[in-house]
Image (cartoon, helix red, strand yellow):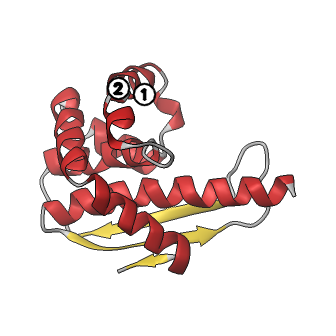
Amino acid sequence: MKERKQRDDDKRQTAFHEAGHFIIAEHFGVGVRCHLVDRGTPTDWETSFTGQTTYRRSTAFRHAVIGWAGVLGQEMHAKEHDEWFNEVDFIWEYFEVGPEDMSETDLQAVNGHPMKRRAFDTAVRILSRNFQQVQIVAANLIKKGVHP
């Protein structure tokens, strides 16, 4: 029972993470698709699911914005818009101090442009305006494992 709950939570968080990436990539006109990968039983070090968002090449700045969108989207998974929006400064501070919690791909994207805070703020603005779309994409990922 505990394992099932953990798997469901992992899937939901991963879906929101990938939905964040996808919505920003789509905003920039470079989004292709996103999907989840079931990794099986969760462990102390790995979640049950991972994901991948595919998008066409873009500028380093846009790539950094897309990189930030994963952690920002993941934090949307059990929140209303205002609750999430009020926590974005905490997200910035947490990931500036402990970036090892970001995936290697996201970390490379975020560090690929010198204006990290500007990229972060841009991701916040885009996701805030598209909060409901993130939820729709995440729900589709949870149900089908792929979007679109």
Q: Which mark is residue 95?
A: 1
> Up-down: is 148 above or below 132?
below
Residue at image position (71%, 59%) is: 7
Picture coordinates of residue 8, whole percent (x, y): 68, 60
Residue at disc 2, secondary structure: helix
Q: Residue at x 44, y 19 (%)?
A: 97
* Disc sitting over residue 50 in the figure: none
Percent x, y of residue 101: 53, 35
Crowding near the residue tagged with mark 1, few <14, some 14–19, many ≥20 C-alpha atoms within 10 Å: some
* Residue positioned 75% across, 55% down in the render: 5
**Left or right placement of residue 124 versus residue 13 in this view:** left
Picture quadrant where residue 55 is located: bottom left
**Quadrant the C terminus occupies:** bottom left
Q: Which amino acid type corresponds to the residue marked 2 in the rendered image?
A: Trp
Count neighbours of disc 2 (C-alpha within 10 A) and say few if under 14, some if 14 to 19, many if 20 or more. Answer: some
Whether 90 is drawn above or below 43: the answer is above
Q: Position of residue 133 (x, y in %)?
A: 29, 62
In the rendering, at what x and y percent does residue 38 appear? 65, 70
Apparent side of residue 73 relative to residue 112 in the rendered image (left or right) = right
User: Which is more toward the observer, 72 or 109?
Assistant: 72
* Residue labelled with disc 2: 92
